[in-house]
């Protein structure tokens, strides 16, 4: 069940440590909960970052993602260690694991990418600028890298 989608800004990995930069918006909360549940974390623990019950009124308080800034969170289970940093405009998730297939499958199926910028290469003389768009290629499922 897709609850929300990450908007990936960038990724990096060395086979064990995976870093994902994600656009910070309200969709992030639902997508992050879904992502973490897919990595076998308890939904209620993850949801607790974004909502809690007021003890006096018993009212459910939902925290807006824009109000979470310069905060780090850390989660771990038998297969994954996850660190999350909430910046002003983006969220950085670092996942350490030797079992990356489950995480990568989730991101391929349930994340979207920002649209690449058009880079203009200025030609000398009176010719019009040449537009170059960077290519983004996804690896096939059975690639090992």
Image: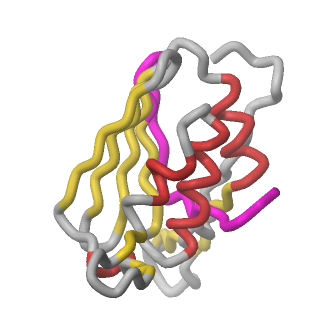
Residue 29 spot, x, y in % from top left: 51, 66
Side of 109 relative to 53 (left or right)? right
Residue at 45% across, 36% down: 12
Q: Estimate the x, y position of residue 108 in percent, counting from the top left.
A: 73, 44
- Which image quadrant for residue 117? bottom right
Q: Viewed as shown, does residue 143 lie left or right of 57?
A: right
Position of residue 51 relative to residue 136, above or below, is below
- Residue found 78% across the figure and 48% down from its top: 109
Q: Position of residue 138 (x, y in %)?
A: 73, 40
Q: Is residue 1 toward the left or the right of residue 80 in the image?
A: right
Magenta span includes 2: yes
In this orientation, does residue 15 appear? no
Q: What is the quadrant of the N terminus in the image?
A: bottom right
Whether residue 18 is visible, yes or no, is yes
Q: Residue at x 69, y 23 (%)?
A: 101
Residue at image position (40%, 35%) is 82
Q: Name the residue nearer the viewer: 55 or 19.
A: 55
Q: What residue range appears in magenta? A: 1-18
> On the rendered image, what quadrant is the C terminus found in?
top right
92 to 61, vertically: above or below: above
Q: Quadrant of residue 63?
A: bottom left
Residue 93 relative to residue 116: left or right = left
Residue 122's spot in the image, x, y percent? Answer: 45, 74
Per the image, is 63 magenta? no
């Amino acid at each position: 069940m897709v609850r929300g989608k990450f908007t990936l800004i960038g990724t990096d990995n060395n086979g064990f440590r995976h870093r994902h930069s994600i656009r910070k918006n309200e969709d992030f909360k639902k997508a992050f909960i879904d992502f973490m549940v897919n990595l076998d974390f308890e939904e209620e623990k993850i949801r607790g970052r974004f909502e809690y019950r007021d003890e006096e009124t018993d009212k459910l308080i939902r925290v807006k993602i824009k109000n979470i800034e310069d905060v780090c969170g850390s989660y771990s289970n038998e297969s994954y260690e996850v660190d999350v940093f909430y910046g002003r405009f983006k969220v950085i998730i670092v996942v350490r694991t030797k079992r990356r297939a489950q995480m990568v499958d989730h991101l391929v199926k349930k994340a979207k990418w920002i649209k690449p910028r058009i880079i203009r290469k200025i030609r000398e003389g009176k010719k019009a600028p040449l537009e170059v768009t960077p290519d983004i290629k996804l690896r096939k499922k059975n690639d090992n890298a």
